[in-house]
Image (spheres, rainbow, N blue to C red):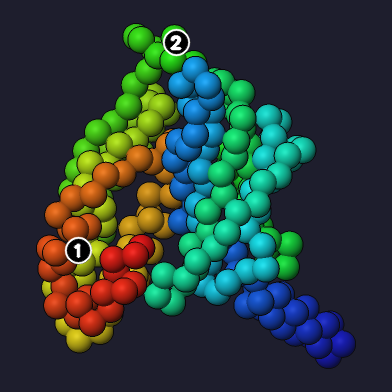
Amino acid sequence: MVSSLLKAFIVGCYVSAASALADLPTQIHIALAGADGKGNSNGMAVSWNTKSNTATSIVKYGVASGRYDQASSGSASAYFKTFNHHVVLSALQPSTNYYYIVGDDASGWSKEMHFRSAPLSNDLRGNFSFIVFGDLGVFNGDPTKDYIKSISKDVQLVWHAGDVSYADDSFLHAGCATKFCYEDTFDTYMSGIEPWVSALPYMTSPGNHEAGESIHCTVCHAFNDHVLTH
């Protein structure tokens, strides 16, 4: 009995230690990136976040679930406390389902995600639907996010026309009046929308909450180098 309990304790400690060492990707999202000589979109940028830097930033992908016969590498950069990774997948076949994982051998890999590459330009008319909205954040945004998730299988692209996450308003909420919550708020927002932005190109444009001259958060001004270069 004692021996069994000891073994269970050792296994539990091992699993806990392994989980602690792993820095698994979060906030996985994609965006259209690049075009061929005829103007057809044929690339996809894949981005994610980790708590610390990793030795490499890699996307493994393929056209069959669980079979990743292609790989592309990219780069990572620090924002404030965490690291954002970016990899571009080039020369994709049009209107093709791709399955992918992101991460690093040492720090761990994400679960499998999937997306459908862009169609040829000639096939767009009458055969392409997308969502356009603006002003969406962590607070008071759940009904909109739930609606987008509910129709995400019926559209091919998401366009967020400014004011992404309202991270610069984080100082208005409990616990953030005297500390820098910008990054935490943005990370929370991106983690919350991962289910659909990991499958649909998430295209954004700047709004007044992204404009450096209009940053609402007074605390943010002390960290301008981080806020304005994100």
Q: Residue at x 67, y 46 (%)?
A: 72
Q: Residue at x 40, y 75 (%)?
A: 80
Task: Count neighbours of disc 2 (C-alpha within 10 A) and say few if under 14, some if 14 to 19, many if 20 or more.
Answer: few
Q: Is residue 104 rendered to the left or right of residue 116?
A: right
Q: Is residue 224 above or below residue 132?
A: below
Whole-percent x, y for residue 206 in the image: 23, 49
- The residue singled out by tag 1 in the image is 212
Q: Which residue reaches farthest front? A: 37
Q: Position of residue 14 (x, y in %)?
A: 75, 79
Q: Secondary structure at mark 2?
A: helix
Measured as percent of width and height from the top left, residue 150 is found at 34, 34
Q: Position of residue 195 (x, y in %)?
A: 45, 45
Distance from Cα at disc 1 to Cα at disc 2: 39 Å
Residue 123 numbered mark, or none: 2
For the residues carrying marks 1 and 2, which lies nearer the camera in this image?
1
Helix, strand or loop at mark 1: helix
Q: Is residue 119 visible?
A: no
Q: Which mark is residue 110?
A: none
Quarter of the view holding residue 22: bottom right
The foreground one among 80 and 129 is 80
Instruction: Please give the name of the residue rendered at 67% of the width and 40% of the height, measured from the top-left corner.
Output: 61
Crowd rating for badge 1 (residues with CA inside 10 Å; few <14, some 14–19, many 20+): few
Q: How many marks?
A: 2
